[in-house]
Amino acid sequence: MKSSYAYYPGCLASLSQKELDTSTRAIADKLGMTLVDIPGFTCCGAGDVHEARPEYYLHLNARILGQAEQLGQDTLMTICNVCTLNLRQANAKLQADPELLRRVNRNLKEVGAASYSGGVDVRHLLWEIAEGDGYEKLKQIAEKPLTGIKIAPFYGCQILRPSRLLGFEDPDRPQSLERIIEACGAEPVDYPSKIKCCGFPIVLARAEVALGELIQPLAEAKEAGADAMVTPCPLCHLSLDAWQGKASREADMEFDLPIFHLAQLVGAAAGLSYDELQFKRHVVKAYPVTDKIYQGV
Amino acid sequence: MQVTLKIERYNPEADESRQETFSVDVVEEATLLDVLDVIKDEVDGSLTYRKSCRMAVCGSCGMRMDGAAVLACKTPMRPVVEAGEVPVISPMGNLPVLKDLVVDMEPFWAKFRAIKPYLDDGGEEPPVKEWRVQQEELDRVMTEALCIQCGCCVSECNSMEADPDFLGPAALAKAARFVNDVRDRGGKSRLEIYNGPHGVWDCTRCYFCNQRCPKGVHPRDAIAKVGAAIYQEGMHSDGGARHAKVFVKSTHQTGYLLETHLVPETVGPVNAIKEIPFALRLARAGKVPNPLKPHKAKKLDEVRKLNKLIESQEQATLEAANAGPTRPPADPAQSKESE
């Protein structure tokens, strides 16, 4: 874990998923991480700009990395899987090809944006607290163990695959979320589709296909006895939380599974309150689980 | 070394499935395919699987080890034995099982045929004996040309599990190989095939295909290349392309995603009306940002200029690609070659 990071919350945590940004800032404080805001950061383009206009995507991300560099930070911290893959993929391309980096910098200069030398590493919050001194610090701040609560880890895709670009852990047998759940005093629940897709990228353009994908982890986690689910990605969270009602009707099953952001799980174990972690901003009500956490009922 | 495998067996005559455990002694260099061969030769001759080249070229021996698709001939067993594991060997996913580890590849080939896997030269005569393709033009399709059609990518495709008609990563990687072939004149009619209801916009970007491909084809990246070609040709009829358009527009207008534009502009105004109760539920949780006061990034002019600058560069690249193969210089050596 670093003592300071250029902090990139991305779009969702700045907009509809604000509770993730708030919770992240709150736990960073507890963990002793300084988060330096990036003035003028934009959307990373998600998979959409990446697909439709790959050159524009590359420049958008180079601009963000250049802005982080300008802050004097060598590590940019993300809290979203899609931002993580987008930024890391652009970074890997730019770092591996000096001619490409020169060309991109010429374009950035032409529009008056900060150039990028290739010196920034992109890391997700999950990786910073799942091992090493970050994990030790996590164990220290988890003063209110979530004893007796069964939590299903849901990784989402773009923090695991392609491992050539992400590479933190075995993409088929990840353990980082399980380790964090244990450090928080809760019990991790295992189920096969924890590494599969939540369907979110196509939830509007191909609703039926996306719901077909979303039902699997919800049904399996429920079957495995989970009280709640935790995810390191705000897009997965939106899918699992806001679209859970639709998945429930489609599958004709009652899920009622509260979905935690990673930072909320850590925050709850660190003694931050329901309001501080903004659980009220969830569509699937979190109180069946948060009541157990905060009131022991 | 001794290798123990649990193998999923399927007997089509009795429609019976079972898991059987086999332990055999093999050389330390043995691959999964070598182990299966020893089992078949020495223990149970009825064990059924496909194989041919034994060197990761023919694409016959795709199967799953502990749920992950691999080429049996490219999978060394020593690390598995050293880790003390007893892996489960099963047939690939997303394809019907015929017997034991053999799947029916016909649905796979049907999708290959559907994407027009051959060069469409538009009837144009090459300037010399053949079209001359420059190295950098070949480089554009070389990654996808490495595909051996083993099906490992298809096996774990999350979208195909939910929509079995999805053209899928293997067929669409082959599509990218023709879309970006400088000699191909298929143009929009070719792209229309990939822009259909079960085409590129079905891909959920789970990246299992990139993870599983034993040849480094990166099928998801190939699907994105086809999506880019469709998008940049101005073919925005599909909800997937319209969804992407909102992201591009968002970065230009505010720098952030215009979340409230996504639903109406992806699904259309009529379907968006049906989503009003859903939107209200989200609004009650505070998940609908005020559309009248969108969050705006600082230094937005940089991004707007960047968008316009890159757009003009993309247009120039598109025009160059549409101009066709590089014409060979009219030198005597080439005329001689053409005779």
Image: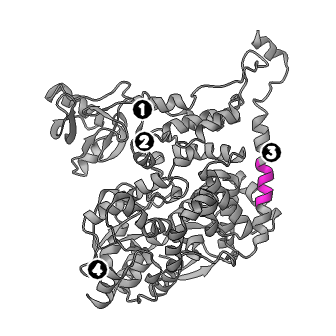
Q: Which residue appears at 79% of the width and 38% of the height? A: B320
Labels 1, 4: front one = 1
| Kind of element beneath mark 1 | helix
Q: Is residue B252 above or below residue B47?
A: below
Q: CA distance from mark 4 to mark 3?
A: 57 Å
On whether residue B310 falls in the magenta region, the answer is yes
**Residue B176 circle label:** none
Q: Quadrant of residue B199?
A: top right
- Of all chains, the one bearing label 1 is B
Percent x, y of residue A125: 48, 72
Percent x, y of residue B166: 48, 42
Q: CA distance from mark 1 to mark 4?
A: 48 Å
**Residue B316 circle label:** 3
Q: CA distance from mark 2 to mark 4?
A: 41 Å
Horizontal side of residue A291 vs A15, given as left or right: left
| Kind of element beneath mark 4 | loop
Q: Please indicate, yes or no, whether residue A95 appears anywhere in the rendered image.
A: no
- A149 or B146: nearer the eye? A149
Q: CA distance from mark 2 to mark 1?
A: 9 Å
Q: Please tell me whether the stretch drawn in magenta is mainly helix, strand or loop.
A: helix
Label 4 crowd bin: few (<14), some (14–19), many (20+), radius 10 Å: many
Q: Quadrant of residue B20?
A: top left
Image quadrant containing the N terminus of chain B: top left
